[in-house]
Amino acid sequence: MTISDTFKGIRNTHGKAQTRKTPIVIDDLRSMVQGLKDDLIGKRDRALLLFGFSGAFRRSELVSLQIEDMAFKREGVEILLRRSKTDQEGKGELIPIPYGSNLETCPVRSIQSWLEASGIKSGFLFRAINKHGHVSQKGMSPASIAFIIKRNAYIKGKEMQFSGHSLRAGFCTQSALSGVASHASMRQARQKKFETHQKYIRIADMWKECAATKLGL
């Protein structure tokens, strides 16, 4: 028997706590974007955070977005997601990103501001920016999403609690907290199985229906 077999047996016997990163819900998101500078990096990070949240994008999806696949409409922006985890055949899915009610947290206006400031007209939507303020021609890596989240001033001291998945998890959790119908939330997040979405509902309900809050402590 190998050491890995031994530890596997221990885990099967005693169980292993699941490590779940903290979702970024709307109050977190507001604080995160409010603390950003109005320079080129700040504009990109604001657009990335708001777009990533409102589109419930996976990290790989977010960094793969192309300007050519965006269409600005009266209601907001339509994004053609050419391939995703749940669309391995590459048929593509249209993702609607509506205008926000608040200027500071509007994903559409943030994208417009980033495109105007960066001057990019085609290719990858989100790109690296070097210390001289030059925008790369290449797209970002999925790991960059976690880096941008963790370096945000609002997250300081809590970096280990968050990950690149926190934006997508935050959308699903906030949808449940806000009473959004499950089918609508699942459609925006491209979730095929209700069991996947249900775990976010359970987290939201845990706080909404917590008996301890009614005890007068």
Image: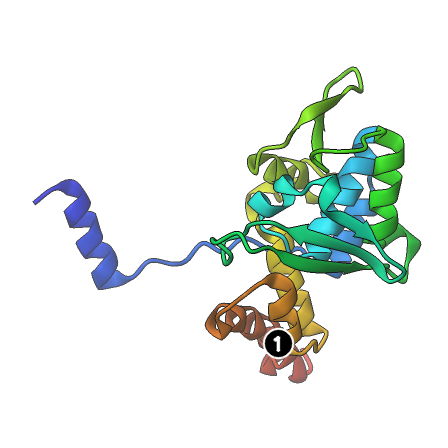
Q: Is residue 207 shown to the viewer in this render? A: yes
Q: Amino acid at mark 1?
A: His
Q: Position of residue 51 (x, y in %)?
A: 74, 50
Residue 144, how many percent across, how many down?
61, 34
Q: Is residue 193 left or right of residue 28?
A: left
Residue 101 rendering spot, x and y as whole percentages: 90, 62
- Which of the pair 3/181 is nearer the observer? 181
Q: Residue furthest left?
A: 1
Q: Residue furthest top?
A: 132
| In this rendering, position of residue 126 left or right of residue 83 | right
Please indicate, yes or no, whether residue 164 appears anywhere in the rendered image.
no
Label 1, on which residue? Answer: 183
Report the number of numbered marks.
1
* Quadrant placement of the C terminus: bottom right
Q: Residues within 10 Å of mark 1 (few under 14, many from 20)?
A: few
Nearest the eye: 47 or 30: 47
Quarter of the rendering containing residue 45: top right
Residue at 21% over, 49% down: 7
Q: Is residue 71 above or below residue 193?
A: above
Q: Colour mode?
A: rainbow
Quadrant showing the N terminus: top left
Specify whether 119 is left or right of 169. right
Which residue is depicted at the point 59% across and 58% down?
Answer: 169
Q: Is 32 placed above or below 211 here?
A: above
Say what secondary structure mark 1 lies in. Answer: helix
- Image-quadrant location for residue 182: bottom right
Name the residue rendered at 72%, 39% in the picture. Answer: 152
